[in-house]
Amino acid sequence: MTETAHIVEARDLLFGYDPKTPVLRGVSMAAAAGGFTCLLGPNGSGKTTLLRCLLGQIRPQQGAALLDGVPVGDYSPLDLARMVSYVPQFPTSTFAFTVREIILMGRYPHTGALGLAGRQDLDVADLAMRMTETADFAARTLEELSGGEAQRVMVARALAQQPSIMLLDEPTSHLDIRNQLLVYRLLQRVAKDWPMTVICVSHDLNVAARFADSLVLMRGGQILAAGAPADVIRKDLLEQTYDVDIELIRAGDSPVPFVWAK
Amino acid sequence: MSRSSPPRRLTLRSLLLQAAVLVLVTAAVALLCSLVGVMHLRHSVWTLRLMRMAAAILVGAGLASSGTALQGLLRNPLAEPFILGISSGAGVGVLVGRVAFNMIGLGTPILAFIGAVVTCAVVYAIAQRGRRIDPYVLLLSGVIVNVFNGALIFVLLMVAAPNEKLNYLQWSMGEMPDWVWNRPGLLILCACFVAGGLLLLLLRGAALNTMGLGDDVAASSGVPVHWLRVEVFVVVGMMTAAAVCLAGPIGFVGLIIPHICRMLLGPDHRKLVLYSAAAGAIALMLADRLCQVGGKAIGVGEIPVGVVTALAGGPFFIYLLRRRFREVRR
């Protein structure tokens, strides 16, 4: 289960759903192999759009999203799925699949067209359930779970894909603190141990700064700053990004100050 | 709705075994049904009786598995060929062939297929916004396209020869038309449409399962979402065309059967495609016999099958609309 992690890179991305109003205006960034990167920035700054470019779901009008130096669009859908997995903001399941069935769907790119799970697929799903602490409700449906439990199921499904890159779109924005910590600790752990390149869109500066190896700060479709948390969590940068007065507070033994928006 | 049974792995062997059992059960029901009721005098010969059952099997299997696939693909429990206007599109194709080219034969399913696929494309184009499909707009566009196709069918009927009008009226209500009986080739072509469609849907079962988690998750699992939609619409067009050629635009089979199967078996499309095909085939054979025997019993002659499916399906649709639509909007 030790695949090598991959480098994710955006090179000069220009993209607009409507060509006249670009959402990404020349975005360049790189996420180190095996690192945990958080994308931060106010609503509408282009974080999700950047993520969708990296996923290959939208094609930039200029520039390229690269995985290991190869444009995302050059991979076949199945090859890409064996490399990159995705966790949405809101877990949904239209039909009443059980948690185990949903997690096994993560095996889609590894099984044949019929998606018949073999012994090995079940083992991978079991491991994913153990890592995310979802085994207890394996036989329940998503609807019967709390938001935090459901989101952990989606992370487990993404893990079952055995990717070397995981992209997450605000996975914890509607979770309580305990579930937030659970998810972030898990991401931190898989990034290091798997190893996996994790890129996560987030709104919680403090949680992101505490768990991620590097932060990318976006505003208006551009990147304002990128680097280690201590270099990005700066009063002037954050005030410029979010248009609020910021105070940085030293808390506990954390190496990164706590952000307090006044 | 948790199912308490222990997790059982779906294997190729169990899937094939289930398919074989379903084929046998369907065949047995076909034999039994062909013994029931007095066939029309011309149908007294055994081969003709079996042809009628074969037609019922194709219509029921095609429509029910089409409904299953559409509901999974569009994440919409109300999707089915009739409601989305695909059946009426195929009906326009049939009548264009009959009225404009004076033709019933192997070209009929082809024209019906063209009508069905064009309708699919129109409904899809209306409901699609930025690569996503709005469930409300989808149903509304189905309603509108249905009205439009209905008007086209009416115009074509007006142009048709007067002595054929009653024929077509009955066909449009779901009575298996006379033109099938002396054309085994037509039946065989329709069987190819349905069998080919079923095979492809079975192979897309796992992809349809992941569609339930949303387009983005499905795409990131390696499902080519856009291409899958094209494939399923073409296959549904094929199977609906076959069904409409054989028995007119019958409604609601594609709605009720998939839901009953889903309630009994769970949501796995790999099994649902098979089971809904078999259940649809059996349901339509029984409905066909019921219409004949029941119609004779109350002295009105043979009742078109479409009347029965619509009478049963209409209330069921409203029930689903009230109970399930909330979930779709999430």
Image: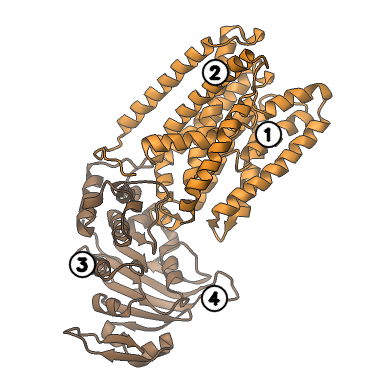
Chain colours: A brown, B orange
Q: Give the residue pinned by disc 2.
A: B53
10 Å crowding of disc 2: few (<14), some (14-19), many (20+): many
Left or right? Give the position of A38 relative to B65. Answer: left
* Identity, as a three-letter code, of the amino acid under mark 2: Met
Mark 1–mark 2 contact, CB under 8 Å? Answer: no
Left or right? Give the position of B124 relative to A77. Answer: right
Chain holding disc 4: A
* Identity, as a three-letter code, of the amino acid under mark 4: Pro
Distance between mark 2 and mark 3 Cα atoms: 61 Å
- Quadrant housing residue A158: bottom left
Dot 1: what SS?
Answer: helix
Q: Give the residue pinned by disc 3.
A: A189
Q: Residue A22, which numbered label?
A: 4
Q: Give the residue pinned by disc 1.
A: B91
Q: Position of residue B130 (x, y in %)?
A: 56, 61
User: Nearest the camera: A13 or B226?
Assistant: B226
Distance between mark 3 and mark 1 Cα atoms: 59 Å
Q: Are marks 1 and 2 on the same chain?
A: yes
Distance between mark 2 and mark 4 Cα atoms: 60 Å
Distance between mark 1 and mark 2 Cα atoms: 21 Å
Figure disc tally = 4
Dot 4: what SS?
Answer: loop
Q: Where is residue A25 in the image (x, y as percent from the top left)?
A: 50, 79
User: Nearest the camera: B246 or A16?
Assistant: B246
**Disc number lying in front (2 or 4):** 2
The residue at the point 61 percent across, 13 percent down is B297
Q: Are marks 4 and 1 on the same chain?
A: no
**Disc number lying in front (4 or 1):** 1
Chain holding disc 3: A
10 Å crowding of disc 1: few (<14), some (14-19), many (20+): many
Mark 3–mark 1 contact, CB under 8 Å? Answer: no
Distance between mark 3 and mark 4 Cα atoms: 36 Å
